[in-house]
């Protein structure tokens, strides 16, 4: 038995210790490479997050623009409809010291939206002849 214990102590234990040291070094190298790979993946992920954020912002601007365009398409467009001469439509009334123009015409909605309450404003002045 002494030969076997001597063999174990002189050859087998140092070889097993050396193999364990080599495998530990290999595992440390593999762990280092994995850490580098993870760090690289994190940098790529951060870049992708930034690009996605930029895409979300540009998409938000596009959606707001499309919503405005959609609302503009749904606006009413009320026009005076008349047939014939314009002098038959416009009348001037100067009673009681106030002047007013009377428009004798129907109003039609030529737009796509619903015209609920129509108000007309004409910001001009007619000077007396």
Image (cartoon, rainbow, N blue to C red):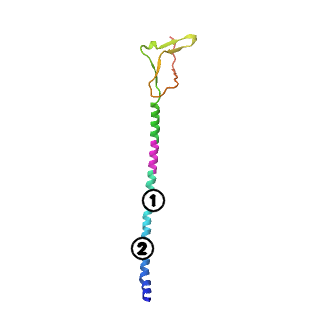
Image coordinates of residue 58 in percent, x first then y, are: 45, 42
Q: Which mark is residue 22?
A: 2
Q: CA distance from mark 2 to mark 1?
A: 26 Å
Which quarter shows the N terminus? bottom left
Which disc, if any, is residue 39? 1
Using the image, determine if residue 24 lies above or below residue 78: below
Q: Is residue 18 magenta?
A: no
> Contact (CB < 8 A) between labels 2 and 1?
no
**Front position in the image: 111 or 127:** 111
**Residue in the picture at 44% in, 89% down:** 2
Q: Nearer the viewer, residue 34 or 74?
A: 74
Q: Main secondary structure of the magenta part?
A: helix
Q: For residue 20, what is the image quadrant?
A: bottom left
Crowdedness of circle 2 by 10 Å Cα count: few (<14), some, many (20+)?
few
Q: Position of residue 32 (x, y in %)?
A: 44, 65
| Residue 29 percent across, percent down from the top left | 42, 67
Residue 54 lies in the magenta stretch: yes
User: Compared to 20, does 102 lie above or below?
Assistant: above
Q: Residue at x 43, y 57 (%)?
A: 41
Q: Secondary structure at mark 2?
A: helix
- Write down the quadrant of residue 110 in the picture: top left
Magenta extent = 49-59
Give the answer, above or below, for where 52 lies relative to 95. Answer: below
Residue at 45 percent across and 56 percent down: it is 42
Q: Residue at the far right: name it.
A: 96
**How many labels were placed on the picture?**
2
* Residue 114 pos. (x, y %): 48, 27
Q: Residue at x 46, y 39 (%)?
A: 63
Q: Which mark is residue 107?
A: none
Q: Residues within 10 Å of mark 1 (few under 14, many from 20)?
A: few
């Amino acid at each position: 038995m002494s030969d076997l214990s001597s063999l174990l102590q002189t050859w087998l234990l140092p070889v097993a210790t050396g193999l364990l040291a080599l495998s530990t070094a290999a595992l440390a190298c593999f762990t280092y490479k994995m850490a580098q790979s993870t760090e690289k993946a994190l940098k790529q992920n951060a870049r992708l997050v930034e690009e996605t954020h930029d895409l979300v912002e540009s998409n938000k601007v596009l959606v707001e623009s499309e919503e405005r365009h959609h609302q503009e398409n749904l606006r009413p467009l009320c026009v005076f409809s008349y047939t014939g001469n314009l002098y038959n439509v416009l009348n001037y009334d100067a009673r009681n010291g106030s002047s007013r123009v009377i428009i004798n015409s129907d109003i039609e909605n030529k737009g796509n939206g619903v015209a609920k309450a129509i108000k007309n404003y004409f910001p001009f002045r007619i000077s007396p002849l």
